Image (spheres, rainbow, N blue to C red):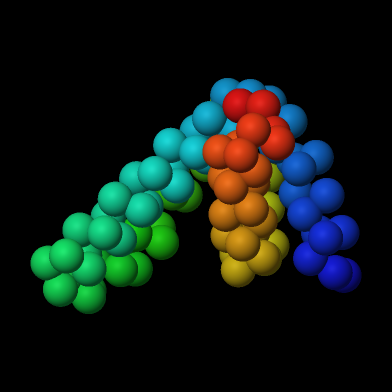
Amino acid sequence: MSFQRYYKHYLTLHQNRNCRRLHLLGMAVSMVVAIIACWLSCWWMLPLALAAAYPFAWLGHFAFEHNRPAAWQNPLRATAADLVMTWQIFRGQLKF
């Protein structure tokens, strides 16, 4: 499956605005952790940066979307799709 097709499917799992907001918050937390890890040269913190977004995203799925997170089936593609969704929200292409 192409990434474009996967991303269209990914967006169907993220229709609720509160779920998208929690994803955005999780991505922000992840980015802050990554920046701090790089700033302090604490490379062991980088895996924490990757994991920091998941609690927010999963809360969005369980509390608002009532579906299973896409990361359970394909974590790498789901992370890439989450980055694209975050970028589109910032550019005003998706509502949040």
In the image, residue 1 above or below residue 82: below
User: Which image quarter: residue 15?
Assistant: top right
Residue 94 relative to residue 18: left or right: right
Of all residues, the one furthest to the left in this rendering is 40
Q: Nearer the viewer, residue 71 or 92?
A: 92
- Image coordinates of residue 16 in percent, x first then y, are 68, 26
Q: Residue at 87% across / 70% down in the picture?
A: 1
Work out which residue is located at the far front of the displayed protein and give it.
91
Q: Residue at x 34, y 68 (%)?
A: 47
Q: Position of residue 46 (x, y in %)?
A: 30, 68
Q: Examine the rendered structure and indicate whether residue 5 appears above or below residue 58.
A: below
Q: Is residue 82 above or below residue 58?
A: below
The answer to whether residue 68 is above or below residue 92 is below
The residue under the point 85% across, 69% down is 2
Relative to residue 12, is residue 79 drawn left or right? Answer: left
Q: Answer whether residue 58 is visible to the viewer in this image.
A: no
- Quadrant in the picture for residue 5: bottom right
Q: Nearer the viewer, residue 9 or 69?
A: 9
- Which residue is pictured at 22% across the width and 75% down the height? 43
In this view of the protein, can residue 90 be seen by the observer?
A: yes
Number of numbered callouts drawn:
0
Expressed as whole percent of the image width and height from the top left, the position of residue 70 reads 68, 53
